[in-house]
């Protein structure tokens, strides 16, 4: 009996030795005049859900945000470093930095420390040169501009959905509806995604935040 209890205790505490992870679903979509970014809110340590309402949409500048997936510690550190660098660069230039500059800075850190970091990120925002932009920065440190990007553990469940439902030149409202439906489907199927859906609409005026909770999140039954 004692050995059985000890085995149960050891198993129950496995999460204490597991890195905190934003095993997650993140995505961003460009529209004429800006971008829509979105993410679920579940943070896990192995099978243990350590936070149900994490904000994975992290500010770099007033008009540039990053969607985080991978190790929570690694992605937070990268976001903090890049945010500081962009603030310094903006002061030197006397104008806001471009979204491409922010994406390349994120890429450089992920590439330089690719052997030790667990981070896959989406950099999205608006600047006066190119308008709304989305840049995918996967593990390993590559960067690619895409009109629509999905990432995280839940993304594997919605590639078919995105192929069928994403259309070129979608307007803002259509992008919001697409992000909501895509992330909710991934949350329904991926054990590492869940909680609420946080969304941001980034334009020339800044960001408009949206939160979908409870019955506002679509449900799916098979």
Image: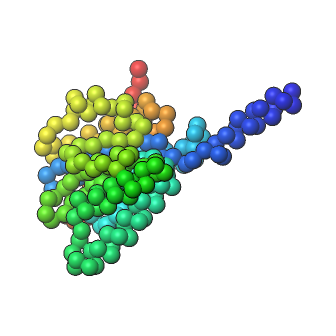
Q: Position of residue 98 (x, y in %)?
A: 22, 64
From the top left corner, tell me how far across and down residue 220 is, in percent. 39, 28
Residue lying at 27% horizontally and 50% vertically, measured from the top left = 143
Q: Residue 116, how many percent across, how many down?
A: 48, 51
Q: Position of residue 84 (x, y in %)?
A: 38, 70
- Relative to 9, 115 lies left or right: left
In front of the other: 203 or 75: 75
At x 22% / y 49%, what residue is drawn? 145
Residue at point 34% right, 50% down? 141
Report the colour scheme: rainbow
- The quarter of the picture where the C terminus appears is top left
Is 16 rendered above or below residue 158? below
Return the residue found at the far top: 222
Q: Quadrant of residue 2?
A: top right
The reply to whether residue 161 is in sight is yes
Q: Is residue 60 above or below residue 120?
A: below
Figure label count: 0
In this view, 48 is above or below 143? above
Q: Which image quarter holds the N terminus? A: top right
Residue visible at 45% across and 33% down in the picture? 190
* Residue 185 in view of the camera: no
């Amino acid at each position: 009996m004692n050995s059985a209890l000890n085995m149960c205790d050891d198993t129950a505490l496995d999460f204490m030795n597991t890195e905190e992870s934003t095993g997650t679903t993140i995505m961003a979509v460009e529209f004429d005049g800006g971008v829509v970014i979105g993410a679920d809110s579940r943070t896990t340590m192995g099978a243990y859900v350590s936070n149900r309402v994490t904000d994975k949409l992290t500010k770099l500048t007033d008009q540039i945000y990053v969607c985080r997936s991978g190790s929570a510690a690694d992605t937070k550190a990268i976001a903090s470093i890049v945010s500081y660098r962009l603030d310094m660069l903006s002061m030197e230039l006397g104008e806001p930095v471009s979204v491409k500059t922010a994406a390349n800075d994120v890429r450089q850190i992920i590439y330089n420390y690719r052997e030790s970091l667990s981070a896959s990120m989406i950099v999205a925002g608006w600047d006066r040169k190119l308008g709304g932009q989305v840049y995918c920065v996967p593990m390993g440190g590559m960067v690619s501009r895409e009109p629509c990007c999905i990432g995280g553990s839940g993304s594997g469940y919605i590639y078919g959905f995105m192929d069928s439902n994403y259309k070129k030149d979608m307007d803002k409202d259509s992008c919001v509806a697409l992000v909501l439906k895509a992330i909710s489907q991934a949350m329904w199927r991926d054990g590492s995604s869940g909680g609420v859906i946080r969304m941001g609409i980034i334009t020339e005026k800044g960001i408009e935040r949206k939160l979908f909770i409870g019955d506002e999140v679509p449900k799916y039954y098979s």
